Image: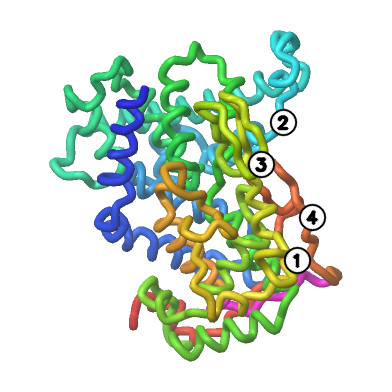
Amino acid sequence: MFNFSLQVKGLYMTKLFNMQRLQCFKPIRMDEMVGLIRSVCEDVAIAQNMRTKLQVWACNLISRMTMGKNLNNISMITKVHGPMLLEAICKSLILIGRPNFNELMPFLKCLDIQDLERRTNESFEKIDTIFQRVIDDRRNIGPHGYENDILDILMAFQGDKNAMSNGISSDDDIIKAILWVTNYVYGVSFISCVFFISIYQNSDGNISNWQDLFTGGMETSSVVVEWGLAELMRHPEVTRRLQDELDRVIGKDRLMSEEDISNLPYLQATVKEVMRVHPVAPLLVPHESTQACEVAGFYVPEKTRLLVSNWSLSMDPNSWEEPQEFRPQRFLNSDIDVKGHHFQLLPFGAGRRGCPAINLGLLNVHLILGSLVHSFEWTLPVGIQEVDMSETFGLSLHKTNPLVLAASPRLSKDAYVSPTNH
């Protein structure tokens, strides 16, 4: 298992999420960003469910990066309607994030009193079937002769006789497991991915234990962007300052690009503050002590499972002045980052259990949140006085109710017609 975990980690770091691979996928990221902006433009006359739009954007983006196809193209191959696929994915993320009483009372496992096992199996079987059809389609087409997307990489890895020589076969289950983690929970920590793959490979079809694997996982960047838009609606002074920076650096004749991010310190500060106030993973990946030890005066027995409260770190008054307040300016003259170097802010975890897709996640959040704020003026629908900020804890900490907003374009018409011109 240990050697296998090293192989998977090497695959992630050298093939799937290295900087060269991220650069290769840049056209896809920009194309999907433009698609999101145009989707909002098409519905400017009505109130828009931003959660749905962000989920479609994220699903299309990661699906194209991993399988070379967006939801519509996958639907053509699998004969599954795009919205039904997205619904199955979202439903599975909700189910695997719910507390499972069977873990506290194993003797009730056979009863499935919450009906979680049946519903979770049903959702995962749909997704498994879809992934298998995509893999079979790629296999029928034949090798591209080059690594075009992550599925190509995984299938090349599958064909390597020495790639998996530690008792775990390199069949399609391995590919489907990595596709699942990479596609729809790509913020999941590396160690969760390894355990997920090993159980996927060795399971007998029972998915009731999968919840454990995602305790430290995160959903896509869509959750962070939705929280960001919600906070900006509650703090118009932050929105104005952010738009002033965006207008000064980018202007109003083109859309934002990834190259602009490094020149937008207030946007970077805003993203950090969103991740601090609304940690998508309030509990990091479970750790287990390998031997008895003492930590800060507390005795920890061997094989004790430990959970790190990311939310408590983000709200610690000893680390943050007025931690409950949303204040992006706190990061303007600070060297605190989100990459695991400062333990008071760990949205992606740290060390060997940190998120392998941190660079991809940061690019997506900055680009999409910045683009939406730069491209549109946002208002609450008629009759709504304030944003509902209630939270629901599941696989991630997301808004209980989807964010619904009305948008109006604030850039020149040419910016939306020729979005890639600089």
Spatial CA span between label 4 and label 1: 14 Å
Q: Relative to the observer, which residue lies in front, 148 or 97? A: 97
Say which residue appears at 24% left-offset and 27% top-offset: 158
- Left or right? Give the position of 405 relative to 176: right
Which residue is the site of mark 2? 99
Within the image, what quadrant is residue 257 found in?
bottom left
Q: Which residue is mark 4?
A: 390
Q: Position of residue 208 (x, y in %)?
A: 61, 20
Q: Nearer the viewer, mark 2 or mark 4?
A: 2
Q: Amino acid at mark 1?
A: Gln
Say which residue label 3 marks. 297
Q: Residue at x 61, y 86 (%)?
A: 241
Q: Position of residue 84 (x, y in %)?
A: 57, 38
Part of the protein shown in magenta? 373-382
**Quadrant assignment for the N terminus:** top left
Q: Secondary structure at mark 3?
A: loop
